[in-house]
Image (spheres, grey):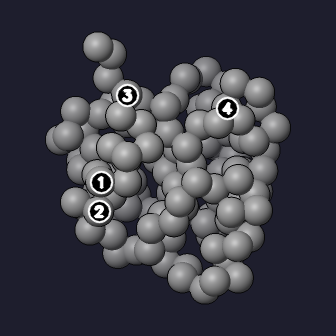
Amino acid sequence: MAKKRILSVDDSASIRQMVAFTLESAGYDVVTAVDGEDGLNRLKTTTVDMVITDLNMPKLSGVDMIRQIRTIPALKFVPIVMLTTESEERKKMEGRAAGATGWIVKPFNPDQLLAVVRKLVS
């Protein structure tokens, strides 16, 4: 069976590295992007099974990126999880309205991240 591929979008290099390390150690293939705009560009050339994105990023926020992803027919039902420091209910509602599947607050627990990923892509 082919490895599941996950796109990790975050402007923090350390978060991208931690997410990639956690997921690759569990057998997933990880593609990274530095902001929402970069994430959308990666999706033009790479097929993914899931997207994990930060909310607050330069150029294009996570919510705006999700809105654009949800307009692409092939990606309409790909799970998207917000991984962010934001925990306000208003922000979560905005993310859900844009099309986010789930929400994890940073700093994240690797086991929690893996549990969410396994639930959504396995």
- For label 3, the SS is loop
Q: How many angstroms separate mark 2 from mark 3 (CA)?
A: 18 Å
Q: What residue type is labelled 3?
A: Lys
Which residue is outermost to the left? Answer: 25
Residue 16 - label: none
Q: Is residue 21 left or right of residue 119?
A: left
Residue located beneath label 1 in the image: 115
Q: Name the residue under label 2.
A: 112
* Image spot of residue 82 (x, y percent): 54, 61
Q: What element carries label 1?
A: helix
Earlier along the polypeptide chain: callout 3 or callout 4?
Answer: 3
Residue at 44% over, 74% down: 105
Residue 59 against residue 4 in the figure, above or below: below
Residue 60 in view here: no
Residue 108, quarter of picture: bottom left
Q: Which residue is drawn at 63% across and 56% down?
A: 100
* Upstream in sequence: badge 4 or badge 2: 4
Return the residue at label 4. 75
Q: In this view, does 29 lie to the left or right of 22?
A: right
- The residue drawn where x is 75% and y is 41% is 70
Tell me residue 122's x, y (percent).
35, 34
Mark 1–mark 2 contact, CB under 8 Å?
yes
Whether residue 112 is visible: yes
The residue nearer to you, when weighing 112 against 36, is 112
Instruction: Provide the residue designation for mark 3.
Output: 4
Q: Residue at x 24, y 60 (%)?
A: 110
Q: Nearer the viewer, mark 3 or mark 1?
A: 1
Relative to 100, residue 6 above or below: above
What is the x, y in percent for residue 33?
52, 44
Discs 1, 4 touching: Cβ within 8 Å: no
